[in-house]
Amino acid sequence: MDRIDKEGNRLPIKIDSTSNGEYEPIPISPINERANKLALHLAGENARRSGQSRRKFLISSCGAASTLLAFNQANSYHHKRGGFFDIREESALDASSALAEVEGGEFIFDVQGHYVNPEGDWLSRIPPAARPYAGMEKAACDAGETGGDRGYLNCLSGNEFIKDIFLDSDTDIMVLSFVPSTRENEPVTIEDATETRNIVAQLQGSKRLLVHGRVNPNQDGDLEGMDELAENWDIAAFKTYTQYGPGGIGFYLHDDPGLAMIERARRLGVRNICVHKGLPFGPRSYEHSQCQDIGIVAKLYPDMNFLVYHSGFVASVQEQEFIEGAGRDGIDTLIQSVLDNEVAPNSNVYAELGSTWRFLMRDPDNAAHALGKLFKYIGEDNVLWGTDSIWYGSPQDQIQAFRTFQISQEFQDRYGYSAISPAMRRKVFGLNAALPYQIDEAEIRALTANDFVASEKLAYQQDPQPSFLTHGPKTRREFMNFLKWGSV
């Protein structure tokens, strides 16, 4: 597959079955299939009308607007009334109109990013013929020094990460996070993450990358390792996976290991506990992927911040209006937990959108319920922007889709959801995360406005070459290979 897509056969807004590797890929619906075909058809027509090649048209703001309009058309035809992409029809051909709608100057702080070290020591611990993260080879990345059958891993490298995040998207800052694994099998170690942060720092972009410290307190040595992470690696938070553990058995945050982790983080002065909730790895220890423990520890530790990565979202669950006591899975487990424990909105529980928003982009009804409930019960000051990229390629499409998504008046009236205002978008995109991560927006703006990354991006935008590729597993076969040789 041509990485650059010179013929313009890939859409700038990527609706496909790609998973982040933490859940089995779910095929897109017939509605999505038709929406993608319609978007490609309209791209061809609009490219001819504007006198451009289809590739040139698709990488423009009009290309993004045209794609979102096609999605609206397909969803409207199938009576999806919960939400829509608020785009004017003329934006498909009018560059100034498209720019005003799909581009923006918000402060964008992405609190969940990933990449893989294609030459790391972790590869020595698996058989030579194993193909971890397979499925990405179709992207035709340069084999580089990795070479051989694992050259595709360069699609997920630190260099590709920097390009996808900082050149091909509007992201200002990102947090490098971790996947569930033992310390020996991490595809990106704390040393790797810090080296990448240092590379960016050497490019005069010292504030653009923050780093998590991975800890699973039910694994031998992880609790003790928290001291080194906090004292030697300048971490911004601890990241944990409550469904993960020895023998596939997880833990609750209010169990002894969870409480010990929180107490230790508190003593070390690290106030942010980032916890994967939702997107269950499978049936084993499923209950630990749900959010019933969040409200308990948030009430016990009001001086700590609990950042719920993925917001408890479960891809196989269709989100609905929250009904107290109904016992529904998904985001409702988070909402029920904070209500049961009298944790007020906009306090110390945060809902993060990594992979969640990317999946919700498929279905405007699902998206309207999920976002509407989070704003209503977790609070509009406590919903955090995350994309789980590089698994989904550049996050620019997620940014453009969120910039334009609106909850319908029908759903606002029926369920008491708020319209998504420009002020709320700015909060979600970056201002909300600035508080728990102790980032001053004005300082960041000043430091990044003229740094090397900004100047590189300015030059790059004269001839941008986005790939519009996604990199995570797309089929059950790829996902099972990921489970076999990956980290989950």
Image (cartoon, helix red, strand yellow):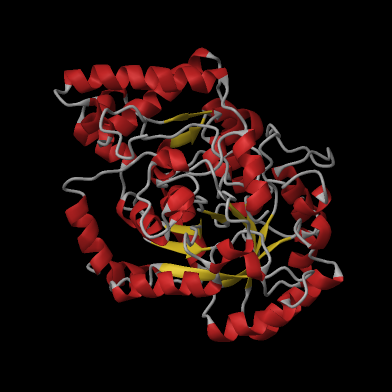
Location of residue 64 in the rendering, given as x and y in whole percent from the top left corner? 33, 33
Residue at 67 percent of width and 44 percent of height: 313
The image shows residue 407, relative to residue 351, as above or below, that is above
Residue at 38 percent of width and 24 percent of height: 69
Location of residue 284 in the rendering, given as x and y in whole percent from the top left corner? 82, 48
The image shows residue 464, relative to residue 174, as above or below, that is above
Report the residue that reaches farthest toward the top.
77
Residue at 47 percent of width and 63 percent of height: 119
Residue 367 visible in this rendered orientation of the protein: yes
In the displayed structure image, the side of residue 235 where residue 349 appears, left or right:
right
Q: In which quarter of the image is the N terminus?
A: top left
In the displayed structure image, the side of residue 203 where residue 330 appears, left or right:
right
Front residue (pair 467, 167): 467
In the displayed structure image, the side of residue 285 where residue 208 appears, left or right:
left
Residue 449 visible in this rendered orientation of the protein: no
Location of residue 237 in the rendering, given as x and y in whole percent from the top left corner? 59, 71
Front residue (pair 46, 434): 46
In the displayed structure image, the side of residue 298 where residue 99 appears, left or right:
left
Q: Residue 218 falls in which quadrant of the image?
A: bottom right
Location of residue 425 in the rendering, given as x and y in whole percent from the top left corner? 45, 48
The image shows residue 130, relative to residue 418, as above or below, that is below
The image shows residue 301, relative to residue 187, as above or below, that is below
Residue at 51 percent of width and 62 percent of height: 433
Total numbered labels placed on residues in the image? 0
Report the residue that reaches farthest toward the left.
51
